[in-house]
Image: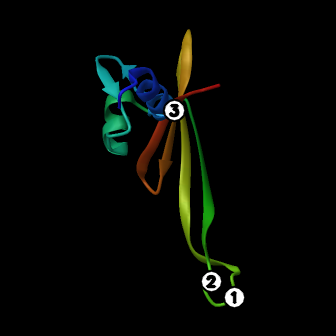
Amino acid sequence: MKNPLLAAALLLPIAAFADETFRCGSWIASSEMSVAELTAKCGEPTSRESKTEDVKTRNSNNGLMVKVGETTVETWIYDRGANPAMVVTIVDGRIKSITRQQ
């Protein structure tokens, strides 16, 4: 691209949605970790919530939505005192995202 400002503006939305990381003692927690690694390095979360959601797809014959399975979504919150709490979203046993609590 000839205009570096335009290139930076196009990449800005991508960076805004990037997963965050947070420090657990001497470790850095990230979405690349397994749930077992996260628990081993950061301990149990301050709170956790779990829900099961239906997985649906559109039926090609009549266009109606049809349930094809279920997925488990867990939300773990790590309270970090004076720092904003971190929210870890786990889908089917894998870390999907890490974000700051709003």
40 horizontally vs 102: left or right: left
In 3D space, how far apart are the residues under numbered discs 3 and 2 (Cα atoms)? 33 Å
Residue 59 is labelled as 2
Q: Is there CB contact under 8 Å for labels 2 and 1? A: yes
Asked if 93 appears above or below 55 in the picture, the reply is above
Residue 13 is labelled as 3
**Which of the two discs, 3 and 2, labels the residue nearer the N terminus?**
3
65 horizontally vs 73: left or right: right
Quarter holding the C terminus? top right
| Amino acid type at image mark 3 | Pro
The image shows residue 55 at horizontal and vertical percentages of: 59, 68
| Amino acid type at image mark 2 | Asn
At x 56% / y 22%, what residue is drawn? Answer: 85
| Residue 51, picture quadrant | bottom right
Quarter holding the N terminus? top left
The image shows residue 56 at horizontal and vertical percentages of: 61, 72
Residue 72 is labelled as none
Q: Nearer the viewer, mark 1 or mark 3?
A: 3
Asked if 84 appears above or below 78 in the picture, the reply is above
> What colouring does the structure picture have?
rainbow
Identify which residue, 50 or 17, lies in the foreground.
Answer: 17
| Amino acid type at image mark 1 | Asn
26 horizontally vs 58: left or right: left
**Which of the two discs, 1 and 3, labels the residue nearer the N terminus?**
3
List the residue tagged with mark 1.
62
